[in-house]
Amino acid sequence: GAGVSQSPSNKVTEKGKDVELRCDPISGHTALYWYRQSLGQGLEFLIYFQGNSAPDKSGLPSDRFSAERTGGSVSTLTIQRTQQEDSAVYLCASSQGLYNSPLHFGNGTRLTVT
Amino acid sequence: AQKVTQAQTEISVVEKEDVTLDCVYETRDTTYYLFWYKQPPSGELVFLIRRNSFDEQNEISGRYSWNFQKSTSSFNFTITASQVVDSAVYFCALSEAISNTGKLIFGQGTTLQVKP
């Protein structure tokens, strides 16, 4: 079946501009996660959605970052007034939402802020 | 606090050598899961294995094997007879039952290079 789909695969933007990254999870997966992977770094948790519950935003690095999940499916991660330190690969994952459920990752969006 | 440490940043081996990737974790939870993921050059993280905190049996899958030892809080990954296709970044991760979110805490990753 279809995996997690992310778009765009690459995004180059100028400092100060806003960007939107999209994630389409695996059908039927109730949980959706955003992670950030900076060059040479591990994966940093950003935000988590589970069904209709309030999202866990504890990993968002600043108030310039926000995310939505509409209809319990597609999610959009928005970064406002981008900074060069926002350059990274943004990975989306989905799962069945239990603590023992493997996360299934998309290919990520590589964001470059110039 | 929960934490996953992969002390080996990079490992380089020659094809057919065995290699072990180390993973040490910290958690206050008694119920948790440990995971290994592979990230090949293409970038997508691929799930390899899941192990729960109550099952310390070692697991073998083909050339891959995992050694889970609660006494040392370690979950090491061994590749036997390594191949060039094993070249990738490998991540160890922890999920705690107490959070019940499935949120993974990742280590920094180990880059494995297998040379022909």
Image: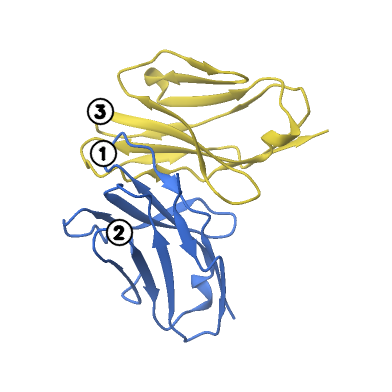
Chain colours: A blue, B yellow
Q: Which residue is mark 2?
A: A73
Mark yes or no: residue A61 visible. Answer: no
Question: What chain is tagged by disc 1?
Answer: A
Q: What numbered label is drawn on residue A98?
A: 1
Badges 3 and 1: C-beta atoms under 8 Å apart?
A: no
Q: Give the quarter of the image for residue B90.
A: top right
- Chain designation of label 3: B
What residue is drawn where x is 67% and y is 34%?
B86
Q: Residue at x 44, y 70 (%)?
A: A21
Q: Residue at x 78, y 27 (%)?
A: B15
Q: Residue furthest front?
A: A1
Name above or below for residue A46 compared with residue B68: below
Q: Is residue B57 above or below residue B86?
A: above
Q: Is residue B75 left or right of residue A77?
A: right
Q: Residues within 10 Å of mark 2 (few under 14, many from 20)?
A: many
Q: Nearer the viewer, residue B40 or A46?
A: B40
The quadrant of the picture occupied by the N terminus of chain A is: top left
Identify the mark at residue B31; answer none if there is no mark. Answer: 3
> Quadrant of residue A58 in the image?
bottom left
Amino acid found under the numbered disc labelled 2 = Ser
